[in-house]
Amino acid sequence: MPSPNASLVAEIQRMLMTKDLGVTKKQREEILDNFATNCRSIMDEAMTKVKRDNRKLRLSRVGYDDRKLWMDYQDPQASENDLTAADYTKFLYGHLTEEMMLALVKLSGNEVTDEQKKVKVAGVTGHMDCKINGVIVDVKSASPHGFNKFQKGTLYKDDPFGYVGQNKAYAFAEGDSVYGWLAFNKVNGEIAYLEYDETLEGTPYHDAVNYNIEDRVKHIKKLVGSPTPPTDLCVEPIPDGSAGNYALSMTCTYCPHKFQCYEGLRSFSYAHGTKYLTTVVKLPRVTEITNDEL
């Protein structure tokens, strides 16, 4: 049976091109009023909300690697302290564009329910984005690289932010096994919809997503209370060139705990940003940054 969201992107695109909305004038006004209210709340929260305490487990984080979860729990403010003003702007832009996407879904005549519904798995709470036409959907704004994974369906292969585990948890709490993502490319404006159905054997993603999320949550609750961190690294360093240098993966590059995981980690300033090398056989021909400059 085809997904009720199979034509979701096409319907939004058609509406944008033709201005032929799928709702009445009264419904349009209600949707736009709600959009304005939500955007105001997002801006207000960005200016006033206190820092989030990572010692409080949430379903949105159950897909992260064990070592990162343990370190976040042990040093709950590290992630916040590592952020720059540009990061906060990026997050704010993401929240606002995600609200825009939900408004477009509604204006195109698709049903949106259960917005920010509270659910619980093994005592850990989370809030889903929504259901679109009855399917649990997380709305994401993404860079071109991230968007490509939603567009091509390869998220299960490279999921550093634990999006699969997050949606699995929401679906499990609702007694479902189907969930999806509506993604927006924040550079070129493209839209994509990706859906995984855990009951479909033989799909490329089946083995990667077919695990017990309740057992995973129970494992995490025990994990973060342990006095010692998991020994396995989240992601192994990757070769950087052919001279024998090794660099952090993109996942580790953005992690605030990278200097704890890699003693002697060295930082180099490239035109595209800072690169972190775990092994330096050949010294890069760029400026090295000392730790106190980071």
Image (spheres, rainbow, N blue to C red):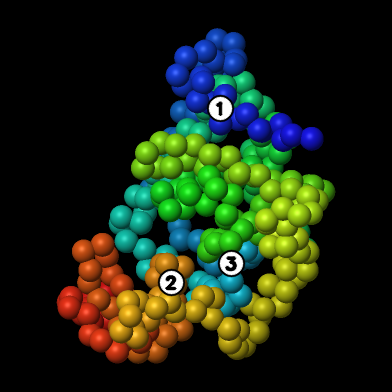
Q: Amino acid at mark 2?
A: Ser
Label 1 sits on a secondary structure element that is helix
> Could you give the CA–CA distance between mark 3 and mark 2, rounded to whole angstroms?
15 Å
Residue 10 numbered mark, or none: 1
Q: Position of residue 270 (x, y in %)?
A: 23, 68
Label 2 sits on a secondary structure element that is loop
Q: Amino acid at mark 3?
A: Tyr
Residue most toward the front? 242
Quarter of the figure that contains the C terminus: bottom left
Q: Position of residue 102 (x, y in %)?
A: 55, 33
Query: Which residue is under mark 3?
Result: 64
- Whichever of callouts 2 and 1 sits on the residue coming sooner in the sequence is 1
Q: Position of residue 38 (x, y in %)?
A: 50, 34
> Could you give the CA–CA distance between mark 3 and mark 1, rounded to whole angstroms?
32 Å
Number of marks: 3
Whether pointer 3 and pointer 2 mark residues with C-beta atoms closer than 8 Å, the reply is no
Vertical placement of residue 83 versus 200, above or below:
below
Other-residue count near label 2 (Cα within 10 Å), few / some / many at <14 / 14–19 / ≥20 = some
Task: Please tell me in which quadrant of the rendered image residue 5 appears.
Answer: top right
Vertical placement of residue 270 versus 170, above or below:
below
Q: 38 left or right of 273?
A: right
Residue at 40% x, 42% y is: 186
Residue at 36% x, 42% y is: 187
- Whichever of callouts 3 and 2 sits on the residue coming sooner in the sequence is 3
Between residue 155 and residue 96, name the one nearer to us: 155
Residue 249 numbered mark, or none: 2
Q: 178 left or right of 54?
A: right
Other-residue count near label 1 (Cα within 10 Å), few / some / many at <14 / 14–19 / ≥20 = some
